Image (tube, rainbow, N blue to C red):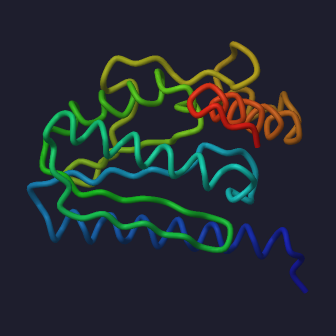
Amino acid sequence: MPNCYSMELQSILKNRCEIEEQIKELLAKYPDCMVMQLVPNIPGINKKVEPAVEIFQIGRDTLLNQLDDYKISVKIEIIKYELAFFAGLWVVKYCGLKIKKLCVAIEDHHPLGMFFDLDVYQKNGKKLNRENVGAKARKCFLCDEPAKVCSLFQKHTYEDLILFIRQTYLKYRYDVKGVVL
C-alpha cells in the first residue's frame, strides 16, 4: 500500500508530465510563438506550502506587468492548480532569448524572484536556460553556493528553507503593503 508521500510524488510527476504535454500541444498549435511557464521555486514534494500560492500570484502579476510594459501580448494564459502542484503557462509571440532575459531579470531582481521559476520554451520545444542569455546559475536561498549543489547534497534542512521563504514573504508584504500577517 503506497504511503501519502509516494502518492503526492506520483501526483506531482503526473502533473509535470501533463504540463509538458500541454506545452508541446501549445507550441504545435501556435508554431510562431513561445511558451512561458511559471512554477513556484519551493523545495520539497508539496509545492503548496504557505505562502507558495501567494508567491505564485505575485510572480504571475509581476510577469504580466512586465509583458505589458514591453507591449508583449499574451495569446493564451492557462493556470493549473492541482493537489500538490501548480503552474502558469503563457503563449507569446516574441523572441525567445529576449523573453528569457526578461524572466531572468524578474528572478534576479524582484524581492521574491528567487522563489519564481520562469521557463521559456522555444518553437522547437527546447527550453532556454539562464546560460543561454549569459546569466549565472541560481544561488541557494541560504548560502552563496549554487542552488543545485545545495539541493543535491541536501545542505540545508527543509524546515530552514521553508522558514526562510516564509520570512522573506512576510518582509515583502510588510515592505510593499505595510501589512503584518
The quadrant the C terminus occupies is top right
Viewed as shown, does residue 87 lie left or right of 133?
right
Residue placed farthest to the left in the image? 32
Q: Tell me residue 114's x, y (percent).
A: 57, 30
Residue 36 versus residue 25 in the image, above or below? above
Residue 24 versus residue 100 in the image, above or below? below
Viewed as shown, does residue 63 lie left or right of 42?
left
Q: Tell me residue 62's x, y (percent).
A: 40, 40
Q: Residue at x 35, y 70 (%)?
A: 22
Front-most of 152 and 49?
Answer: 49
Q: Residue at x 41, y 64 (%)?
A: 20
Q: Tell me residue 87's x, y (percent).
A: 49, 60
Residue 126 versus residue 110 in the image, above or below? below
Residue placed farthest to the bottom in the image? 1
Residue 106 figure quarter: top left
Q: How many marks?
A: 0
Residue 19 figure quarter: bottom left
Viewed as shown, does residue 76 lie left or right of 160?
left
Front-most of 171 and 89?
Answer: 171
The quadrant the N terminus occupies is bottom right
Q: Residue at x 76, y 50 (%)?
A: 44
Q: Residue at x 24, y 67 (%)?
A: 26
Residue 143 figure quarter: top right
Q: Tell me residue 33's x, y (percent).
A: 15, 54
Viewed as shown, does residue 93 lie left or right of 89?
left
Residue placed farthest to the front in the image? 178
